[in-house]
Image (tube, helix red, strand yellow):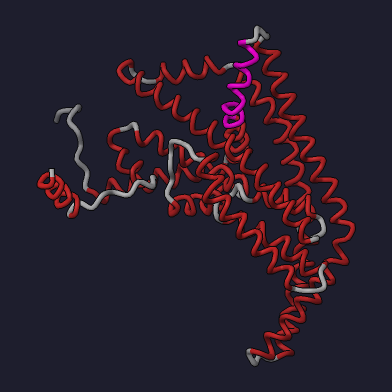
């Protein structure tokens, strides 16, 4: 038997091998998430900061000094934003018990109205509410240690990411040269194009998200101040950050100020005012800000965008939701440049195919007219 002869396995064997390999790969991503997630964040931040470092290098500044200065500016801006959010959050935390009591009273009135309107048993509804509150308090008390451990891990990751970013920026040329050496000489042009487009996708996407978050945050804060909603700065910033998560973040972002409006305002109509203004902001964001600022060479259709956001949450939690779209965009860039995988790249995109039946008819009509 010729050892070089291709083995033609039945479809079910190929599918089984593919599924087992995919399961093993996803399992490795989940098990090693504490290593992989910070590294992916670091790679994306390094790609985003690379043009700034190159700008300082072109101004005859030593590369190490340029990297350190760029990281210092980035950490300073991030720390300033975090300090602002923390200060607002501490004020919010001081008044939270009173807000919670008012919100609970509003919720009780709403459930009583529902029980009368839908002819539900009032005693059962009250018992269900009391049980839900008791269980939520019990769960939160039991999870304090786990929460503190997660916060500690988060701080360690935040301290580790700048180190990763510095190393990636310093060894940028070495890493790119390594990628080229891994592949055959005949593929060098294709590899260069993939690397270039991947860098462009990451830079445009992340830079666009930063600008989008700033604009949406300003719109949120202005709208909440106009309505007289308390903690407008905190809620506006949180809403802008949550808006980065496609489709899902916007729903959570509007729920928070609506809850505060219900707890702090005498009329429940303010919650609907918040909903209406946030809807207008979302329309502006989706139809004006995103197409002009966040758009990139790679377009991902809404179906797979929603799927990967949920998959990212299941795999890596909130970090996975933030990383899902840029990672999928990178996967599409790779698929678009590998011949056997081009159909999958086409499936991930949002380019609608032309109707194969109507197209010849239109072409025939045009030829007769001309």
Q: How many marks?
A: 0
**Does residue 44 sit above or below 86 in this rendering?**
above
Task: Decide if residue 319 is in sight here.
Answer: yes
Q: Residue furthest front?
A: 369
Q: Quadrant of the N terminus?
A: top left
Quadrant of the rendered structure where residue 52 is? top right
Q: Is residue 351 magenta?
A: no
Q: Residue furthest left?
A: 368
For this view, does 221 lie left or right of residue 186? Answer: right
Q: Quadrant of the C terminus?
A: top left
**Does residue 134 sit above or below 19 in this rendering?**
below
Residue occupying image coordinates x 61% and y 10%: 58
337 or 138, nearer to the observer: 337
The percent position of residue 89, horizontal first and vertical second, equals 82, 51
The percent position of residue 21, horizontal first and vertical second, equals 40, 43
Q: Residue furthest top?
A: 60
Residue occupying image coordinates x 59% and y 40%: 209
Give the magenta part as a residue range.
Answer: 43-58
**Does residue 176 sit above or below 279 in this rendering?**
above
Residue occupying image coordinates x 61% and y 45%: 319
56 or 123, nearer to the observer: 56
The percent position of residue 62, horizontal first and vertical second, equals 67, 8
Task: Decide if residue 28 is in sight here.
Answer: no
For this view, does 58 lie left or right of residue 298? Answer: right
Residue occupying image coordinates x 57% and y 27%: 47
- Classified by dominant secondary structure, the portion drawn in magenta counts as helix
The percent position of residue 9, horizontal first and vertical second, equals 22, 43
């Amino acid at each position: 038997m010729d050892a070089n002869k291709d083995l033609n396995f039945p479809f079910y064997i190929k599918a089984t091998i593919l599924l087992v390999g995919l399961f093993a790969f996803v399992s490795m991503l989940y098990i090693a998430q504490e290593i992989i997630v910070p590294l992916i964040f670091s790679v994306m931040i390094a790609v985003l900061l690379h043009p700034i470092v190159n700008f300082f290098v072109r101004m005859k500044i030593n590369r190490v000094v340029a990297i350190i200065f760029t990281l210092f500016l980035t950490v300073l801006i991030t720390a300033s934003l975090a300090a602002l959010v923390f200060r607002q959050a501490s004020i919010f935390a001081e008044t939270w018990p009173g807000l919670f009591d008012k919100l609970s009273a509003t919720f009780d009135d709403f459930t009583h109205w529902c029980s009368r309107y839908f002819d539900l048993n009032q005693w059962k509804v009250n018992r269900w509410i009391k049980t839900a509150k008791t269980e939520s308090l019990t769960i939160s008390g039991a999870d304090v240690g786990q929460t503190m451990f997660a916060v500690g891990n988060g701080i360690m990751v935040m301290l580790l990411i700048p180190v990763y970013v510095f190393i990636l920026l310093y060894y940028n040329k070495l890493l790119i040269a390594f990628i080229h050496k891994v592949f055959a000489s005949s593929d060098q042009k294709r590899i260069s194009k993939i690397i270039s487009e991947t860098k462009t996708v990451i830079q445009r996407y992340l830079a666009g998200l930063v600008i989008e978050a700033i604009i949406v945050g300003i719109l949120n804060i202005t709208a909440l101040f106009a309505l007289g909603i308390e903690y407008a700065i905190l809620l506006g910033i949180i809403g802008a950050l949550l808006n980065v998560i496609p489709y899902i973040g916007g729903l959570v972002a509007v729920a928070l100020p609506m809850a505060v409006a219900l707890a702090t305002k005498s009329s429940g109509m303010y919650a609907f005012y918040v909903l209406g203004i946030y809807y207008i902001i979302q329309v502006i964001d989706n139809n004006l800000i995103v197409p002009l600022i966040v758009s990139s060479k790679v377009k991902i259709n809404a179906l797979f965008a929603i799927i990967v956001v949920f998959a990212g949450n299941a795999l890596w939690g909130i970090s996975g939701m933030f990383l899902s779209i840029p990672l999928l965009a990178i996967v599409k860039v790779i698929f678009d440049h590998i011949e056997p995988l081009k159909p999958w790249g086409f499936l991930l995109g949002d380019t609608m195919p032309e109707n194969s039946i109507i197209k010849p008819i239109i072409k025939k009509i045009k030829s007769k007219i001309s």
